[in-house]
Image: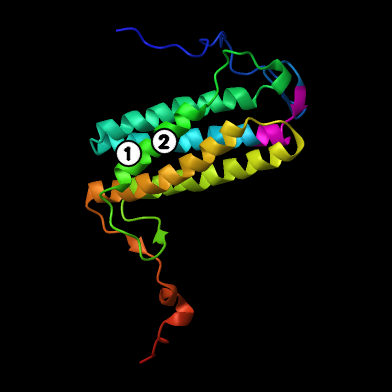
């Protein structure tokens, strides 16, 4: 069975981890340009990289729970996030036609999986607090980091050209992570913790002293 190939394979050799070229606070883009490490573009794909790391943690937890199919989904998303990082690390004029990126196909796949996993979940009557089981909490961390990556990308898009699919992908992924967090609780048999405004200190009866 042949595998469809859309993008070129990576062409790099990592022989040494440190280069000393970033000691002055700059880093290199895919096209060779030097930019500040706190520039909007670096912030954007750096946050995508952070999200990828947290997803790896969630995938390790899912493996321990025996959720093989879900592990496959998370692994695919990790590859997609690296593809997204590739395109964000490249200025528009340097992008190659077969360079890795996210497309409408990745977005549609997220929507399909999200809808399928949401079908059996109970309707929500309030907002959900992270927790209940470890995988749920880890996926909520992924969701919030994903939202931050999306915000960084929107900021970048105000001053530089950014593929529309990139913003759409992160937006859809954050929604998927929310659904997956609920689904993981259901798989673990853990009750969801719903937001109750009056569980705050100001909404509870004052403690009495003996």
Instruction: Please tell me which residue is depicted at 46% across the width and 29% down the height of the picture.
Output: 106
Nearer to the camera, 70 or 125: 125
Instruction: Please tell me which residue is depicted at 40% across the width and 27% down the height of the picture.
Output: 76
The quarter holding residue 113 reads top left
Magenta span contains residue 95: no
Circle 1 — which element? helix
Residue that extends furthest to the bottom in the rendered view of this protein = 210
Report x, y in % for residue 155.
69, 42
Point out the stretch of residues depicted in magenta: 34-43
Q: Which quadrant: the C terminus?
A: bottom left
The answer to whether residue 39 is left or right of residue 15 is right
Report x, y in % for residue 63.
28, 34
Instruction: Please tell me which residue is depicted at 53% across the width and 44% down the height of the picture.
Output: 145
The answer to whether residue 191 is left or right of residue 36 is left
Report x, y in % for residue 142.
46, 43
- Does residue 88 sit above or below 9 in this rendering? below
**Dot in front, 2 or 1:** 2
Would you name the residue on which mark 2 appears? 110
Q: How many marks?
A: 2
Nearer to the camera, 72 or 172: 172
Would you name the residue on which mark 1 appears? 61
Q: Residues within 10 Å of mark 2 (few under 14, many from 20)?
A: many
Report x, y in % for residue 37.
71, 32
- Does residue 193 sit above or below 183 in this rendering? below
Kindly report the distance in space between the C-alpha atoms of the residues bearing marks 2 and 1.
21 Å
Magenta span contains residue 35: yes
């Amino acid at each position: 069975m042949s595998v469809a190939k859309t993008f070129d394979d990576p062409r790099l050799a990592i022989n040494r981890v440190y280069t000393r070229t970033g000691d002055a606070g700059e880093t290199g883009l895919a096209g060779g340009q030097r930019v500040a490490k706190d520039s909007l573009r670096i912030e954007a794909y750096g946050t995508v990289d952070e999200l990828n790391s947290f997803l790896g943690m969630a995938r390790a937890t899912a493996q321990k729970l025996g959720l093989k199919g879900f592990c496959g989904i998370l692994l695919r998303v990790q590859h997609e996030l690296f593809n997204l990082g590739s395109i964000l690390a490249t200025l528009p004029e340097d992008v190659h036609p077969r360079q890795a990126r996210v497309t409408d196909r990745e977005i549609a796949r997220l929507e399909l999986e999200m809808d399928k996993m949401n079908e059996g979940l109970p309707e929500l009557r309030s907002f959900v607090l992270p927790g209940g089981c470890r995988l749920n909490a880890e996926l909520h961390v992924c969701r919030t980091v994903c939202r931050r990556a999306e915000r960084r990308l929107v900021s970048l898009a105000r001053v530089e050209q950014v593929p529309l699919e990139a913003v759409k992908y992160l937006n859809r992924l954050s929604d998927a992570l929310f659904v997956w967090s609920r689904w993981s609780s259901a798989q673990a048999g853990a009750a969801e913790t719903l937001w109750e405004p009056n569980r705050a200190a100001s909404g509870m009866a004052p403690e009495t002293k003996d």
